[in-house]
């Protein structure tokens, strides 16, 4: 089956839908491709909010400095300034779209601004503790009403369609992609003038994660196979406080709970964060996650506890209704007792290398959101900068895409159909399930919060064997969503390990016992480039 469109956007999180709406305002036809339903992905699970310097006591410079400090010297100041200075307009755009942020009559612009770890001021606009869901659901209604936007649900991107740029054999141009229709099992050929990857991160590479099952690094792996550079994939952010319960899945306890005075406690009730950092519970996530990991291993504890019970019960229910209800479903009353928590893989700070308008190494290919490396996050992401990044870079990508469409007004020759003539139905799907489980377990054990060179080498050796096994399976059998995700997961896991092995120091989210100090000579990105095509 062949589909044609002007721009195809892979991913239906905040970055993807924001871009689609902004392109639709310019009269550009877009097709959003999503692995499940439109309202899916990581954005919808974001609890905290969107950071913006809106209080008169706050400033762009303070927000910039907080971001730079959290990034441990690796943020690109140009990217940080671009995003921070674009924050008020991002909030205005969302409010005009119908997002109703929590208000406070005596506050600037009528908004209640929360404070989170690493922030020197209250600057997080939010909708209770379900900001992502409120924002995505509001924008999705506009997507469905737009005559310029189509949505293709239950389709998993396989690979990009790319070829030499006319007159430039040294440069490649993207002209579409292949995608698997999960309902029919058939592969759709999508022909487009521009492709945007907004597939989210790769935290599903780890055994314990706050992310949905769809976070398998698809965009990063697809871009790498097509010839794009990637950067800083060693910096995997582990959220310090994921609810610890056998049936809780991937539920987060928001950073904002600590921002409102929540205390981290050992099982015996002892507070421990002040012994690890002067900012205690308000330290950046990497410091808090390592402190929890240290205390759990030191004491042999299965978890630690987060206590917000000092706050009035009605205030807790008003500010954290989602967390309150979810914990209540497991018979945990956060108004009277502490919540058991553990760290979990949460955010991929590196990704596909882009410029400040989302352009990748390939003509016609853009990357936005968590699967992109813009230079904003450096070695660690400051809380509530991620939803902000999605909106600001979606806005900045629009003129770049319009320029590309003007340069390349023709969609080009129709690409060949997907060829399944040499493959058969798989006979041992247990291989996929087993490899998936194995990757996630040894990534957690060897490439987790604390690393060593020996652990990284063990991971690299096993990933090499698994990569060959998965490639052989992919070559001989018809594709499925599980197989495609596993294929992407092993690629991204290898890239994470390669980046981690190259950084022989500890910085931000990357901590190795072999090089526990930061090295001022390594104040640079870890950039990997694919081998040139033959």
Image (cartoon, rainbow, N blue to C red):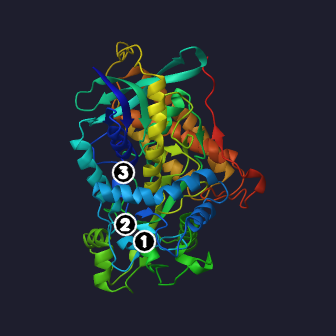
**Which quadrant is the C terminus positioned in?**
top right
At horizontal 36% and vertical 18% (from top left) the residue drawn is: 418
Q: Horizontal placement of 421 versus 223: left or right?
A: left
The disc label shown at residue 126, or none? 2
Count neighbours of disc 3 (C-alpha within 10 A) and say few if under 14, some if 14 to 19, many if 20 or more.
some
The secondary structure type at the circle numbered 2 is loop
Residue occupying the far right of the picture: 521
First in sequence, mark 3 or 1: give its number.
3
Image marks 2 and 3: residues in contact by CB distance under 8 Å: no
Q: Residue at x 73, y 61 (%)?
A: 517
Q: Visible in this render: residue 431? A: no
Do the residues bearing badges 2 and 1 touch, measured as CB atoms within 8 Å?
yes
Q: CA distance from mark 2 to mark 1?
A: 10 Å
Q: What label sits on residue 256 in the rendered view?
A: 1
State the residue position of label 3.
212
Q: CA distance from mark 3 to mark 1?
A: 21 Å
Q: Percent position (x, y) of residue 511? A: 64, 58
């Amino acid at each position: 089956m062949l589909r044609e469109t002007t721009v195809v956007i892979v991913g239906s999180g905040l970055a993807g839908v924001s871009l689609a709406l902004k392109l639709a305002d310019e009269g550009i036809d877009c097709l959003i491709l999503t692995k499940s339903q439109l309202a899916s992905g990581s954005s919808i699970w974001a609890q905290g909010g969107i950071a913006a310097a809106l209080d008169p006591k706050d400033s762009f410079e303070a927000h910039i400095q907080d971001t730079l400090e959290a990034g441990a010297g690796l943020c690109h100041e140009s990217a940080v300034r671009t995003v921070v200075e674009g924050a008020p307009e991002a909030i205005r755009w969302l409010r005009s779209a119908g997002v109703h942020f929590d208000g406070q009559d005596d506050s600037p612009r009528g908004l209640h601004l929360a404070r989170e770890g690493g922030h020197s001021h209250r600057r997080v606009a939010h909708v209770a503790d379900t900001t992502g869901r409120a924002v995505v659901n509001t924008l999705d209604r506009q997507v469905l009403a737009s005559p310029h936007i189509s949505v293709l649900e239950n389709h998993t991107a396989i690979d990009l369609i790319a070829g030499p740029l006319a007159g430039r054999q040294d440069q490649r141009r993207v002209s579409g992609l292949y995608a698997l229709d999960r309902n029919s099992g058939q592969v759709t050929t999508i022909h487009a003038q521009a492709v945007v990857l907004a597939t989210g991160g790769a935290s599903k590479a780890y055994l314990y994660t706050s992310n949905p099952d769809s976070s398998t690094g698809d965009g990063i792996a697809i871009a790498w196979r097509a010839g794009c550079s990637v950067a800083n994939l060693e910096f995997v952010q582990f959220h310090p406080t994921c609810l610890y319960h056998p049936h809780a899945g991937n539920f987060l306890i928001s950073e904002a709970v600590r921002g409102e005075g929540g205390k981290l406690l050992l099982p015996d009730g002892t507070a421990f964060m002040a012994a690890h950092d002067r900012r205690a519970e308000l330290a950046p996530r990497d410091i808090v996650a390592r402190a929890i990991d240290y205390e759990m291993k030191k004491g042999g504890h299965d978890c630690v506890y987060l206590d917000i019970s000092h706050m009035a019960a009605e205030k807790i229910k008003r500010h954290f209704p989602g967390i309150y209800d979810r914990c209540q479903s497991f018979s945990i009353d956060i108004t009277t007792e502490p919540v058991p928590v553990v760290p979990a893989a949460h955010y991929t700070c590196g990704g596909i290398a882009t410029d400040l308008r989302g352009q990748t190494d390939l003509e016609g290919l853009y990357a936005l959101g968590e699967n992109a490396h813009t230079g904003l996050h450096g070695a660690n992401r400051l809380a509530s900068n991620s939803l902000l990044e999605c909106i600001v870079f979606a806005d900045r990508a629009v003129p770049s895409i319009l320029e590309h469409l003007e340069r390349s007004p023709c969609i080009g020759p129709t690409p060949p159909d997907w060829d399944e003539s040499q493959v058969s139905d798989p006979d041992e799907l247990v291989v996929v399930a087993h490899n998936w489980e194995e990757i996630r377990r040894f990534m957690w054990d060897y490439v987790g919060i604390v690393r060593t060179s020996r652990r990284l080498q063990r991971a690299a050796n096993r990933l090499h064997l698994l990569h060959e096994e998965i490639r052989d399976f992919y070559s001989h059998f018809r594709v499925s969503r599980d197989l495609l995700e596993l294929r992407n997961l092993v690629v991204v896991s290898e890239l994470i390990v390669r980046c981690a092995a190259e950084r022989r120091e500890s910085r931000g989210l990357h901590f190795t016992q072999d090089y526990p100090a930061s090295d001022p000579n390594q104040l640079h990105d870890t950039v990997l480039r694919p081998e040139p095509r033959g």
